[in-house]
Image (spheres, helix red, strand yellow):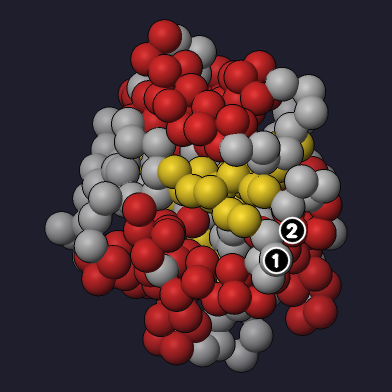
Amino acid sequence: MPPDPGSPVGVFDSGVGGLSVLRHLWSELPHEEVIFFADQAHVPYGPRPLEQVRQFSVEITRWLLARGAKLIVVACNTASAAALHHLRQVFPETPFVGMEPAVKPAAESTRSGRVGVLATPATFQGELYASVVERFAAGVQLMTHTCPGLVAQIEAGQLDTPKTRRILEEALQPMLAAGIDTVVLGCTHYPFVIPLIEEIAGPGVRVIDPAPAIARQARRLLVERGWLSSARESRPPHPCTRFLTTGDPRKLEAQLPKLLGISASVDQINFSEPPGPA
């Protein structure tokens, strides 16, 4: 039986990075109820084994589906690289939207033929990244960097500190010296430091955030299935969204005004307890 159009959209990430996708989902889907799930007890996902990230992703998806989620947005590049194909096999009736490194638009728009990609180790190790490179990056030189420590800085709200700047300079300066004119953000945390990236890279370098395209894809899938909600009016400054974390809810609550410009309560989820009623 197909879900009710009023059912929620589930969104998950290892931490606050998925909020960079959520803000675009609000724009594309202003009438949708959303459940945002941050697995902050296990952040960052990037250095973890792919199998472990896959296990976390399956557990979170089961939890969201138990609460009626009609579509799942995997708002995490690492989880998408590790688990997206597996999730589609395990939950064949559920539509998924995952993060794909924006190598294609970068390859199409670069003038120098040199592109920088910033992502986590697990993203670079995943089959998804390898597939994107094989399909779209012929004739383009890709320079990659894992930006160690950057996710932790963003999780701590340190968006423009000397340490954050140093991490980005170490990643970007060799790329800039090699002549890149495009930077692909391969982690959903990284859009929150775009101003700093642009300051370091200069006006001649384009920074690509894939989140707007992900939000448009989520809308397309809902429209195709007739699952788009239109009855509920949005509640400014954001639609009806429930925020959840496996970590300390006070930390996420403190981040929301800085990252989304809103205040909201956050509920804590303990995976040692089986999902109960919604």
Seen in the picture, residue 174 relative to 83 is either above or below; the reply is above
Please state which of residues 139 and 273 is positioned toward the viewer in this rendering: 139
Residue 84 placed where, x, y %? 47, 73
Q: Is residue 74 visible?
A: yes
Q: Quadrant of residue 101?
A: bottom right
Q: Are marks 2 and 1 in contact (CB under 8 Å)?
A: yes
Q: Quadrant of residue 89?
A: bottom left
Q: Is residue 37 visible?
A: no
Give how far apart the Cα atoms at labels 2 and 1 are: 9 Å
Within-10-Å neighbours for mark 1: few <14, some 14–19, many 20+: few
Going by the numbered disc 1, the residue's amino acid type is Gly
Q: Quadrant of the C terminus?
A: bottom left
Residue 275 placed where, x, y %? 29, 64
Seen in the picture, residue 41 relative to 205 is either above or below; the reply is below
Residue 168 placed where, x, y %? 48, 26
Residue 90 placed where, x, y %? 40, 86
Within-10-Å neighbours for mark 2: few <14, some 14–19, many 20+: many
Instruction: Pick whichever of labels 2 and 1 is earlier in the sequence.
Output: 2
Please give the residue where the numbered disc 1 appears in the rendered image: 139
Going by the numbered disc 2, the residue's amino acid type is Ala
Q: Residue at x 41, y 18 (%)?
A: 166
* Count of numbered tags: 2
In the image as oriented, which residue stretches furthest toward the front? 178
Secondary element at image label 1: loop
Q: Answer with left or right where residue 247 lies relative to residue 252.
A: left
Q: Which mark is residue 110?
A: none
Secondary element at image label 2: helix
